[in-house]
C-alpha cells in the first residue's frame, strides 16, 4: 500500500549552488538594510551608561530576562504542540468538513497579537463587563482566570502565532507525510506510535523552524505583552528609553535580544543538519486515517476551540465595537490601499532578498553567517530597529543636502520598505531555505547532462521547483508587514496611514471603538493571503 | 425657450447656499495649496488634532502636515535632523517631552506678547520655548456606590491601610503617572513620594492596568473602589453612559492641588517657517480654537476666556498644582527609578 517504503527515508546530500563567491554580491545587498540597522544597534555600545544599567540590574533586568525566556520558550513550545497536532489532524485524518477545518485553522494568523490581547482583556479581564457581572452576582471575580499572568501571555502568544508552525508542518506533511505514516503502520505500529516514529522525525525542520519563528516573535513582541502587563525585555527597552531618557542603554538592552536570537539560530541549524529528508515527495491521495463519528466530533471541538479563542471571539468583540462607532469608509479605503501597497512591495523585496541570502548561505560559510546575521532583525523590537535606520537615513539626508540634493529619505515609502526588509527578511530566508532544502542535485545534473547552461537550469528548473516555497514566504511576509507598526509609523511619508497606523492612532488614546473597523479590515486583508496559502497544494 | 436650471435640478435656496459654501471651501482649498504648508511633528494622535487643524486651513488657507509618532521618537528625530529638519512645530501630550526638546536645544524662543497674555505663566516655558494648548488633570476616580467623597482627601491618603485591596492604578510605564510622581518629588521630596508609591503598590486590588479607560471601568465594575486617572477618560465614559456609577474627585485641595499636565507646542529651532508656526500657535490659543479643543478632546482650555466643555464644567472646579511643569521632564528618570524601587510595575 505504501507509496514510499520506509527504507527510502535516508539522508541525501542536498543541492548546493555553484559559483559561491559570485552569490555573495546580491546577498550583501539583500542583507544591507538589516546589517545597517543592526550596526546602529551595536554602535550604541559606544556610549556606556553605568548608572542606568546598575538600576536595571538591581530592580528589573533579572526578572525581565527570566520572563522573556519563559515566555519565548513557553509560547513556542505550546505553538509547536498546537500547530503540529492540528496540522496532523487535518492532513492525516479524514473527517467530515476536514477541508473547512483546514482553512479555519489558519485564520488567527491575520489577527495582530496586541489586538487579540486587548480584545480578550476588554471582554474577560479586569475592567470588563463580564467581571463586573461576576462581582455583582457572586460577590467576587477572583474565580475567573486572568490573562494578565505569564501563563496567560504564553497561551495568548501561542494562539496568535501557532499558525506559523501549522502552515510549515502542514506543507511538510502534504509532501509525503501520509506515505510515511502508511509505511510505519505497515510495519505493525499503532497510529500514534507510527506517527511518533515514522512521521515526526521528518517533521523536525518544519517544527523547529516554526517554533523558532514563534520564539523570535515573542522576543520582539511589545504591544501584546505591554497590554497584558508582562514586563519582558522589550517592555524594558521602551521604559529605559521613554521613561529614563536613556536611548543608548535601551538600545544596548535590545542587543541582549540579539544574543538570544543568535543562540536560537544556532540550535536551529544544528537541528536542520540532523534532519532526515523524506524522499519521493509523492503526496498521499487521501488522508490515511478515517475518523469515526465520536472522533470526528472531538476533532471538530479541538478546531473550534482554537479558532474561536484565536480569532472568532476577538473578531466578534471588534465587530461589536465597530458597530458602535462611526466608520469613515473613504478613509478606511485609503488605509486599505496604503497597507496593500506598503506590504505588497515589502513582501516582494523580502522574498527576493531572502532567496539571495539563502542561496549564499548554501554556497559558502561566509554566506551562511550573512544569512544568520541578517535574520536577527526579527528578534528585535521594531522601534529599536526603526530608530537605528532613521538615524542612518537622516545622516544620509544631511549629507545629500550638503551636496545640494534635498530629498525626504527618512520619511518615504522607500524608507518603510527598507525598514520592513530589515525587520522581516528572516521570513524570506526561511521560506527560500526550506525550498532549497528540497532541491535534489540529481535533477540539476540530469539537466546539465542534457546540455542546459546554469541560467537555463536556474530559470526553467530550479525556480519553478522553488515557487511554492517562495509563494508561501511571500504571503507570510505580506501578513507580517501589514500588521507591523513601529517601523511603518516612524519612517512613513506624510499622510500615509496604513491600517495598523489607524488602529494605533485610536488605541493609544484608549478609543477602541474607533480602532475596531481598521483592525477588522486588517484581519480581512490578512485573511486573503492566509487562505491563498491553503489553496496552494504543494 | 429658456430652461430654468434651478427648477430642472429642483434646487431650493438651501441647496443653493450649500453649493456656495462648497465652492467657497473649494477655493479655500486651492488657496491652501498656494501657501507653504506648515509641518508639525505631533505626539497628539491624528483624530485628536486634525479636525482643529482642518479648521485652521479653512480659515487661513495654510495647509498643515502632521508627522505622528511617540514624543521621545519625535525628539530624537528633531535632534538627528538638526538644521535640515522640515519640522516647524513640535506638539506633545505631556510637558516632559517639551522640556526634553527645549533642554536639547531643539526649540526656538518665541517672543509673543499675545501668547504671554493668553497662556498662564506656569503653563509655558519661562524662556518662551513651549506653550500649553490644553490642560488635563490627573485626579481620583471613585465608585459612587461604595465611596463617599468625604472619605477622600489626598493622593497620599490612598496609600493608607484603609485602602488595602481597594485601589486600581494604570501601569507606571505610562508617562502621565511618571509626570505625577515627578512633580510629587519636586513638591514633597523623594522620601515622601516613595512612601506614597509604596503604599499605593501595597493597596492594589489588581496588577496595574494597561490604560486609564480600563482603570475607570474596573472602578465602575466593582473591581476596586478608586483609581488615579486623567479626567477626560472619565468624561468620555460618562458621555457614552451618564449613569455609570463613577465620579471624579480632586485631591490635595488643601495642599498643592490636583496634578496638572498639558498638551503643548513649541516652534522648532530650525523651522523653515517660524512666522507661520507662531501664527498657528497664536491661533490655537485664541478663544474659538480653545473652545473647540475643549469640546473635541474634553480637556480644559489654557485661555481663561474660552468656554470649557459643559461635561467638564459638571465635574466641578478645583485648585491645580502650579508647580513648574519643567519638573515633569527634569525629574522623570528619577520618578521612574523610584517607581521601580517601590514595586509599582
Image: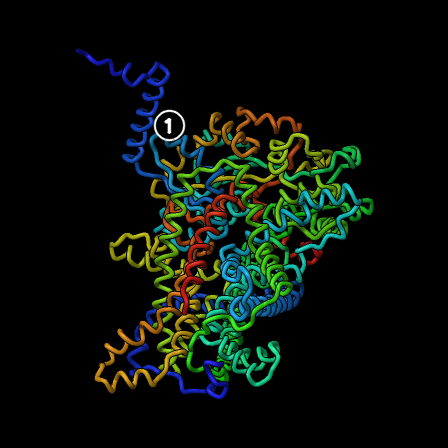
The reply to whether residue B198 is visible in this rendering is yes
Instruction: Name which residue lies at 76% across and 41% down.
Output: A136
Q: Residue A260: x and y, percent?
A: 54, 72
Q: Position of residue B225 (x, y in %)?
A: 75, 41
Helix, strand or loop for disc 1: helix
Q: Is residue A474 left or right of residue A219?
A: left
Viewer-proximal residue among A272 and A528: A528
Q: How is the image coloured?
A: rainbow
Q: How many marks?
A: 1
Q: Is residue A118 left or right of residue A533?
A: right
Left or right of B319: which side holds B265?
A: left
Q: Dot 1 corresponds to which residue?
A: B59
Residue A86 against residue B343 in the figure, above or below: below
Is residue A54 at least partly visible in the picture? no
Chain of the residue on which disc 1 is drawn: B
Which quarter of the picture shows residue B109? top left
- Is B84 positioned to the left or the right of A318 in the image? left
- Seen as rendered, the residue at the extreme top is B1
Which residue appears at 68% of the width and 51% of the height? B208
Where is residue A237 shown, x and y percent of the image?
Answer: 55, 60
Q: Quadrant of the C terminus of chain A?
A: bottom left
Q: Sort mark 1 into few (<14), some (14-19) or many (20+) by Cα contacts within 10 Å.
A: few
Q: x, y percentage for residue B78?
A: 42, 51
Q: Residue furthest right?
A: B162
A9 and A169: which is toward the camera: A9
Q: Residue at x 78, y 37 (%)?
A: B146
Above-or-below relation of A178 to B252:
below
Instruction: Decide: is A116 above or below A204.
Output: above
Q: Camera-side residue: B307 or A466? A: A466
| Quarter location, residue A416 | bottom left
Amino acid at each position: 500500500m505504501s507509496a514510499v517504503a520506509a527504507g527510502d527515508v535516508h539522508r541525501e546530500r542536498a543541492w548546493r549552488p555553484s559559483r559561491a563567491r559570485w552569490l555573495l554580491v546580491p546577498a550583501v545587498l539583500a542583507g544591507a538594510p538589516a546589517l545597517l540597522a543592526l550596526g546602529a544597534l551595536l554602535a550604541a555600545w559606544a556610549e556606556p551608561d553605568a548608572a542606568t544599567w546598575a538600576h536595571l540590574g538591581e530592580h528589573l533586568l533579572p526578572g525581565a530576562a527570566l520572563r522573556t525566556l519563559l515566555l519565548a520558550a513557553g509560547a513556542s513550545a505550546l505553538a509547536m504542540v498546537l500547530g503540529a497536532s492540528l496540522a496532523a489532524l487535518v492532513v492525516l485524518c479524514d473527517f467530515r468538513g476536514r477541508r473547512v477545518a483546514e482553512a479555519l485553522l489558519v485564520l488567527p494568523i491575520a489577527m495582530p497579537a496586541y489586538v487579540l490581547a486587548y480584545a480578550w482583556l476588554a471582554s474577560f479581564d479586569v475592567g470588563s463587563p463580564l467581571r463586573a457581572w461576576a462581582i455583582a452576582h457572586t460577590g467576587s471575580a477572583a474565580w475567573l482566570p486572568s490573562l494578565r499572568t505569564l501563563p496567560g501571555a504564553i497561551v495568548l502568544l501561542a494562539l496568535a502565532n501557532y499558525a506559523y508552525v501549522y502552515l510549515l508542518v502542514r506543507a511538510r506533511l502534504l509532501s509525503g507525510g501520509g506515505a510515511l505514516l502508511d509505511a510505519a503502520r505497515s510495519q505493525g505500529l499503532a497510529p500514534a506510535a507510527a506517527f511518533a516514529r515514522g512521521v515526526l522525525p521528518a517533521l523536525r525542520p518544519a517544527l523547529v523552524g516554526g517554533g523558532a519563528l514563534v520564539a523570535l516573535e515573542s522576543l520582539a513582541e511589545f504591544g501584546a505583552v505591554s497590554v497584558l502587563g508582562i514586563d519582558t525585555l522589550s517592555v524594558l527597552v521602551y521604559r529605559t528609553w521613554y521613561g529614563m531618557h536613556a536611548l543608548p542603554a535601551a538600545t544596548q538592552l535590545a542587543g541582549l535580544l540579539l544574543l538570544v536570537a543568535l543562540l536560537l539560530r544556532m540550535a536551529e541549524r544544528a537541528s536542520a543538519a540532523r534532519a532526515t529528508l523524506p524522499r519521493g515527495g509523492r503526496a498521499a491521495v487521501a488522508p490515511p486515517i478515517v475518523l469515526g463519528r465520536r472522533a470526528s466530533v472531538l476533532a471538530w471541538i479541538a478546531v473550534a476551540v482554537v479558532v474561536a479563542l484565536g480569532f472568532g471571539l476577538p473578531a466578534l468583540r471588534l465587530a461589536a465595537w465597530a458597530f458602535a462607532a462611526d466608520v469613515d469608509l473613504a478613509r478606511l479605503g485609503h488605509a486599505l490601499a496604503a497597507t496593500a501597497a506598503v506590504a505588497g512591495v515589502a513582501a516582494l523585496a523580502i522574498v527576493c532578498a531572502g532567496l539571495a541570502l539563502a542561496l549564499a548561505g548554501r554556497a559558502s560559510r561566509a554566506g551562511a553567517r550573512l544569512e544568520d546575521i541578517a535574520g536577527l532583525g526579527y528578534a528585535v523590537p521594531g522601534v529599536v530597529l526603526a530608530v537605528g535606520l532613521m538615524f542612518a537615513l537622516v545622516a544620509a539626508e544631511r549629507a545629500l543636502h550638503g551636496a545640494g540634493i534635498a530629498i525626504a529619505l527618512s520619511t518615504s515609502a522607500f524608507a518603510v520598505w527598507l525598514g520592513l526588509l530589515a525587520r522581516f527578511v528572516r521570513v524570506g530566508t526561511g521560506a527560500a531555505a526550506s525550498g532549497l532544502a528540497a532541491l535534489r542535485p540529481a535533477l540539476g545534473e540530469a539537466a546539465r547532462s542534457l546540455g542546459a547552461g546554469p541560467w537555463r537550469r536556474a530559470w526553467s528548473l530550479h525556480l519553478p521547483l522553488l515557487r511554492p516555497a517562495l509563494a508561501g514566504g511571500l504571503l507570510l511576509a505580506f501578513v507580517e508587514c501589514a500588521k507591523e507598526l513601529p517601523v511603518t509609523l516612524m519612517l512613513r511619508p506624510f499622510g500615509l496611514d496604513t491600517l495598523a497606523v489607524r488602529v494605533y492612532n485610536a488605541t493609544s488614546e484608549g478609543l477602541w471603538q474607533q480602532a475596531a473597523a481598521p483592525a477588522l479590515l486588517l484581519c480581512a486583508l490578512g485573511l486573503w493571503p492566509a487562505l491563498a496559502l491553503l489553496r496552494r497544494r504543494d | 425657450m429658456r430652461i430654468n436650471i434651478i427648477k430642472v435640478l429642483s434646487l431650493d435656496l438651501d441647496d443653493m447656499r450649500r453649493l456656495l459654501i462648497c465652492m467657497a471651501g473649494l477655493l479655500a482649498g486651492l488657496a491652501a495649496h498656494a501657501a507653504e504648508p506648515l509641518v508639525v511633528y505631533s505626539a497628539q494622535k491624528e483624530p485628536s488634532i486634525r479636525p482643529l487643524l482642518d479648521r485652521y486651513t479653512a480659515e487661513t488657507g495654510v495647509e498643515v502636515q502632521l508627522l505622528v509618532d511617540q514624543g521621545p521618537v519625535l525628539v530624537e528625530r528633531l535632534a538627528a535632523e538638526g538644521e535640515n529638519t522640515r519640522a516647524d512645530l513640535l506638539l506633545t501630550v505631556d510637558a516632559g517631552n517639551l522640556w526634553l526638546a527645549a533642554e536639547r536645544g531643539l526649540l526656538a524662543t518665541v517672543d509673543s506678547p499675545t501668547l504671554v497674555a493668553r497662556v498662564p505663566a506656569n503653563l509655558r516655558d519661562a524662556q518662551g520655548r513651549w506653550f500649553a494648548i490644553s490642560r488635563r488633570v490627573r485626579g481620583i476616580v471613585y465608585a459612587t456606590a461604595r465611596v463617599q467623597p468625604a472619605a477622600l482627601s489626598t493622593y497620599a491618603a490612598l496609600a493608607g491601610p484603609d485602602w488595602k485591596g481597594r485601589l486600581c492604578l494604570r501601569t507606571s510605564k505610562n508617562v502621565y503617572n511618571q509626570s505625577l510622581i515627578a512633580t510629587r518629588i519636586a513638591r514633597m521630596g523623594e522620601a515622601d513620594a516613595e512612601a506614597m508609591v509604596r503604599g499605593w503598590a501595597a493597596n492594589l486590588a489588581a496588577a496595574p492596568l494597561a490604560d486609564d479607560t480600563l482603570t475607570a471601568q474596573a472602578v465602575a465594575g466593582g473591581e476596586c473602589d478608586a483609581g488615579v486617572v486623567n479626567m477626560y477618560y472619565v468624561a468620555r465614559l460618562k458621555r457614552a453612559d451618564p449613569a455609570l456609577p463613577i465620579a471624579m474627585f480632586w485631591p490635595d485641595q488643601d495642599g498643592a492641588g490636583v496634578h496638572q499636565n498639558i498638551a503643548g507646542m513649541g516652534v522648532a529651532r530650525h523651522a523653515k517657517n517660524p512666522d507661520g508656526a507662531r501664527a498657528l500657535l497664536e491661533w490655537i490659543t485664541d478663544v474659538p480654537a480653545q473652545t473647540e479643543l475643549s469640546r473635541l478632546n474634553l480637556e480644559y482650555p489654557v485661555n481663561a476666556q474660552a468656554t470649557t466643555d459643559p461635561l467638564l464644567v459638571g465635574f466641578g472646579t478645583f485648585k491645580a498644582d502650579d508647580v513648574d511643569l519643567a519638573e515633569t521632564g527634569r525629574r522623570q528618570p528619577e520618578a521612574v527609578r523610584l517607581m521601580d524601587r517601590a514595586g509599582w510595575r
